[in-house]
């Protein structure tokens, strides 16, 4: 299937490993020109060489202005970005009273403001060219709270509100905004959270983890011409785990 994104310029955030890397790899497979960003320059360049990313732009999305600086460099070198995939590592684990103000600020910057900064850089060019795709990689926590992930639960729900708002504002310019909500996925983050096979068997009807490549494949479709009328949607990729709408 030709997804119609050959030659499109894509920026994938937090893409040196895990889900971000799988997304970048899939977009490259479909012929897109891909820029990847992450904090560690050595790991980032190693990933770029491995998957064939055209640009590797180091960025710390936990710091204000980190996404702005990286996005501005990409736009300066390419003249614009057609596909933006916002992605970030998970915020601190803990219940409400376990997390201080600093933890909330780190989570808000990493999950929410980094996406806002990136969008502010790339949307003017998308509006001018009358085509664009913005895809938020978030979590099922945005719809169904996960225990001891209070920061993630709260902020990721806000991302869906942002998505809905900008999808209404920019639809007439041929720009779509959609979110992917992965469930339990085989990444290092899952190991950090200490999720066991018993929990997966108990909570996921499919009785298995998602693979990062499955997220990449869905993301590539949402970036495509074929998904041009799909806008403002939050798609759970979770093996049937979520119970709400």
Image: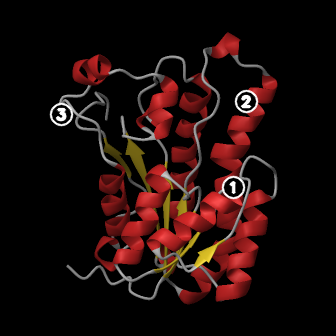
Mark 1 to mark 2 CA distance (whole Å): 23 Å
Q: Position of residue 76 (x, y in %)?
A: 74, 84
Q: Position of residue 24 (x, y in %)?
A: 46, 66
Residue at position x 52%, y 28% in the image: 192
Mark 3 vs mark 1, foreground winner is 1
Quarter location, residue 51: bottom left
From the viewer's perspective, tell me whether residue 54 is left or right of residue 224: right
Mark 3 to mark 1 CA distance (whole Å): 35 Å
Quarter location, residue 69: bottom right
Residue at the disc numbered 2: 104
Residue at the disc numbered 1: 40
Mark 3 to mark 2 CA distance (whole Å): 33 Å
From the viewer's perspective, tell me whether residue 127 is left or right of residue 203: right
* Front residue of this view, candidates 219 and 165: 219
From the viewer's perspective, tell me whether residue 71 is left or right of residue 147: right
Mark 3 vs mark 2, foreground winner is 3
Q: Position of residue 100 (x, y in %)?
A: 77, 20
* Front residue of this view, candidates 211 and 111: 211
Q: Which secondary structure, mark 3?
A: loop
């Amino acid at each position: 299937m030709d997804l119609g994104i050959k030659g499109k310029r894509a920026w994938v955030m937090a893409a040196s490993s895990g889900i971000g890397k799988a997304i970048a790899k899939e977009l490259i497979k479909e012929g897109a020109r891909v820029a990847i960003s992450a904090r560690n320059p050595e790991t980032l360049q190693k990933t770029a060489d491995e998957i064939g990313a055209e640009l590797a732009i180091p960025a710390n999305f936990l710091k204000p202005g980190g996404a702005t600086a990286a996005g501005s460099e990409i736009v300066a070198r390419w003249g614009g970005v057609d596909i933006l995939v916002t992605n970030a590592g998970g915020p601190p684990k803990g219940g409400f009273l376990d997390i201080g103000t600093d933890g909330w600020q780190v989570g808000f910057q990493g999950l929410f403001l980094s996406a806002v900064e990136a969008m502010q850089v790339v949307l003017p060019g998308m509006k001018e060219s009358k085509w664009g795709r913005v895809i938020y990689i978030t979590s099922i926590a945005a719809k169904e709270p996960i225990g001891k992930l209070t920061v993630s639960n709260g902020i990721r729900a806000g991302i869906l509100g942002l998505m809905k708002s900008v999808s209404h504002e920019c639809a007439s310019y041929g720009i779509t905004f959609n979110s992917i909500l992965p469930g339990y996925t085989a990444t290092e983050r899952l190991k950090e959270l200490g999720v066991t096979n018993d929990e997966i068997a108990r909570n996921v009807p499919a009785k298995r983890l998602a693979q990062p490549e499955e997220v990449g494949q869905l993301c590539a479709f949402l970036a495509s011409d074929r998904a041009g009328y799909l806008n403002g949607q939050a798609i759970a990729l979770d093996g049937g785990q979520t119970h709400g709408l």
